[in-house]
Image: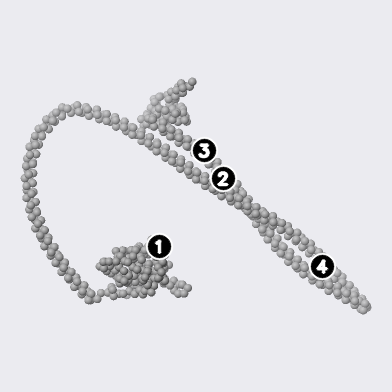
């Protein structure tokens, strides 16, 4: 026999306890019939069971002093997932008597029950299992299906009204122990329950017998009513027969009258048919005329809608161009500010470069002086060495002579030794001075290399400044091009506004004209040639008739349109004649 997973057994036990606790709480609360308070035992056991369910599989968190294992962490996470829970979290933190996270969690559960939102809050929490994994192990009850089942059972608690005093209750030091005696049943309870069920069955039998006698009385009354209804039905049938006889006699009389009227109708029908045909023909003509007028009105309305749509599109385009113009101006101002800032930086870098060049010149002069002094010292050293060599030669000579003249040359030897000591001390001093000069020279070389690096950086800054100047020139060029484009756009917009005004004036003029439809015209109005693909149709803007291209290739300005528009030959001749007659 395979052993069960102990964590699965724990989850099943907690699920069963939650079922019993929620079911017992709902049944006892409904039988209790009033608002529950904190001292109600089933309610206390419910909170204990929920605490055990939330603690199952909870990860241990390390702190500085001890290990912490509390359910306040995941419950505090509900505020981020469910915005309505921020109020309950803030009220829990504001409670003065709570000092531990467990006490805050217990207060949170009680406030959630009073709000009737516990199921909603926990449902929002178990959906986010990736966030719960920070607080729970993978085998915890809140991470498995049992957690979703318990959340579904919590919905039934919305029928309970609870009034819990959280502020004065000591929630930090309570010990959560499940009291199984509330959910276990003994034999005495079962016997009492059976006796109570037997008495309830006897009472139900008595009530059924009483209702049965009432139904028998009602059945007798219903039978009497049926007999009365049958008698009334018999009377109604006899009256119906009399009515039928009278209606048959009346029908015979009316049949004779109808036959006579039918004969007169046949005589007068011929005249009525002629009148009907004439009225029908007039109705057809009027309906055709009305249809034409409606079609023309629809064309005018569609043209008006198209013109309004074109105006709206043009206005929208104007607004968009204005927005782009504002954006380009802002970009230009930003580029100008950048150029000014770079120019200031360049001036500062040029001033620094001048100062550093002056420092380099000074250092070069100083190095030249040091090199000249070193050369002088080297010459003096060489002279001293030569003098030392000569002295040594002279000493040798003097020694040879001293063999013969020892007494006379001892004074000279002592003098030479003194000179030698003096020369050695001078040589040491010169060597030390040379070392100090070499150290100073090394320092000057380091400073010179540092200045050379700075000059290279300045050269790179010059290159960047030149690149920025090139970019500035390009931006200025783009700005000028965009200004030209905006000027062209403004010209086009002014032309489009003029076109819109022309369209409006043409629309006003066209409202008084009757345009001939393209479908109705098959031949030219003047030359009477048939239209085809090569001979296209053209409307005269003055009279509204349709002509071919040869008969309507004239353009004249009309009162409705200041620009020249297409007119037919007859309208062209008539308008020219009117213009010539108006001239003095």
Which circle, 1 or 2, is nearer the viewer? 1
Q: Nearer the viewer, mark 3 or mark 1?
A: 1
Earlier residue among tags 4 and 2 = 4
Secondary structure type for disc 2: helix
Q: Nearer the viewer, mark 4 or mark 1?
A: 1
Please tell me which residue is depicted at 78% across the width and 64% down the height of the picture: 374
| Residue 99 at x, y percent in the picture | 42, 71
- Residue 86 image label: 1
Secondary structure of the residue carrying tag 4 is: helix
Query: What is the number of the mark on residue 381?
Result: 4
Circles 4 and 2, Cβ within 8 Å, touching? The answer is no
Q: Earlier in the sequence, mark 1 or mark 2?
A: 1
In front: 8, or 126? Answer: 126
Disc number for residue 491: 3
CA gap, disc 3 and disc 2: 20 Å
Q: Position of residue 341 (x, y in %)?
A: 60, 52
Height in image: 270 above or below 67? Answer: above
Q: Determine if residue 525 is in view.
A: yes
- Closer to the N terminus: mark 4 or mark 1? 1
Q: Which quadrant holds residue 417?
A: bottom right
């Amino acid at each position: 026999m395979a052993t069960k997973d102990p964590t699965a057994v724990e989850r099943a036990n907690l699920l069963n306890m939650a079922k019993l606790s929620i079911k017992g709480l709902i049944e006892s609360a409904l039988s209790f019939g009033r608002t529950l308070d904190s001292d109600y035992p089933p309610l206390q056991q419910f909170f204990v069971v929920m605490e055990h369910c939330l603690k199952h599989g909870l990860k241990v968190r390390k702190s500085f002093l001890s290990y912490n294992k509390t359910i306040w962490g995941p419950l505090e996470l509900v505020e981020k997932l469910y915005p309505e829970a921020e109020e309950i979290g803030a009220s829990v933190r504001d409670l003065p008597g709570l000092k531990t996270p467990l006490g805050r969690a217990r207060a949170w559960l009680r406030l959630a029950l009073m709000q009737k939102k516990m199921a909603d809050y926990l449902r929002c929490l178990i959906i986010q299992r990736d966030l719960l994994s920070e607080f729970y192990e993978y085998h915890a009850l809140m991470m498995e299906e049992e957690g979703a089942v318990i959340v579904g059972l919590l919905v039934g608690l919305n029928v309970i009204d609870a009034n819990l005093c959280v502020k004065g209750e000591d929630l930090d030091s309570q010990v959560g122990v499940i009291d199984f005696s509330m959910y276990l049943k003994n034999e005495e309870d079962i016997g009492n329950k059976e006796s109570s069920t037997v008495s309830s069955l006897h009472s139900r039998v008595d009530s059924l017998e009483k209702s049965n006698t009432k139904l028998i009385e009602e059945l007798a009354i219903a039978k009497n009513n049926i007999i009365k209804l049958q008698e009334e039905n018999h009377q109604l049938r006899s009256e119906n027969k009399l009515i039928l006889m009278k209606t048959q006699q009346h029908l015979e009389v009316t049949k004779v009258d109808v036959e006579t009227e039918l004969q007169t109708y046949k005589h007068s029908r011929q005249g009525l048919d002629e009148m009907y045909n004439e009225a029908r023909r007039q109705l057809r003509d009027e309906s055709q005329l009305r249809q034409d007028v409606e079609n023309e009105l629809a064309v005018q309305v569609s043209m008006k809608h198209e013109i309004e749509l074109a105006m709206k599109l043009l206005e929208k385009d104007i607004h968009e161009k204005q927005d782009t113009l504002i954006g380009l101006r802002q970009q230009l101002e930003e580029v100008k500010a950048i150029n000014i800032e770079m120019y200031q930086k360049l001036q500062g870098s040029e001033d620094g470069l001048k100062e550093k060049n002056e420092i380099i010149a000074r250092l070069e002069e100083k190095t030249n002086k040091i090199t000249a002094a070193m050369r002088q010292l080297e010459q003096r050293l060489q002279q001293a060495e030569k003098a030392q060599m000569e002295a040594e030669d002279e000493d040798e000579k003097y020694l040879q002579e001293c063999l013969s003249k020892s007494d006379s040359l001892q004074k000279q030897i002592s003098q030479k030794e003194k000179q030698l000591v003096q020369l050695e001390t001078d040589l040491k001093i010169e060597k030390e001075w040379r070392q100090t000069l070499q150290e100073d020279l090394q320092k000057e070389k380091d400073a010179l290399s540092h200045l050379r690096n700075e000059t290279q950086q300045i050269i790179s800054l010059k290159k960047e400044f030149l690149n920025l100047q090139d970019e500035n020139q390009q931006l200025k060029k783009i700005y000028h091009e965009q200004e030209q484009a905006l000027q062209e756009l403004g010209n086009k917009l002014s032309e489009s506004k003029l076109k819109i005004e022309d369209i409006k004036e043409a629309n006003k003029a066209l409202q008084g004209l009757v345009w001939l439809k393209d479908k109705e015209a098959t031949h030219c109005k003047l030359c009477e040639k048939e239209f085809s693909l090569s001979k296209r149709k053209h409307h005269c803007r003055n009279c509204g008739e349709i002509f071919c291209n040869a008969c309507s290739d004239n353009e004249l300005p009309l009162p409705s349109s200041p620009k020249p528009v297409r007119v037919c030959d007859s309208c062209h001749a008539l308008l020219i004649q009117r213009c010539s007659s108006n001239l003095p």
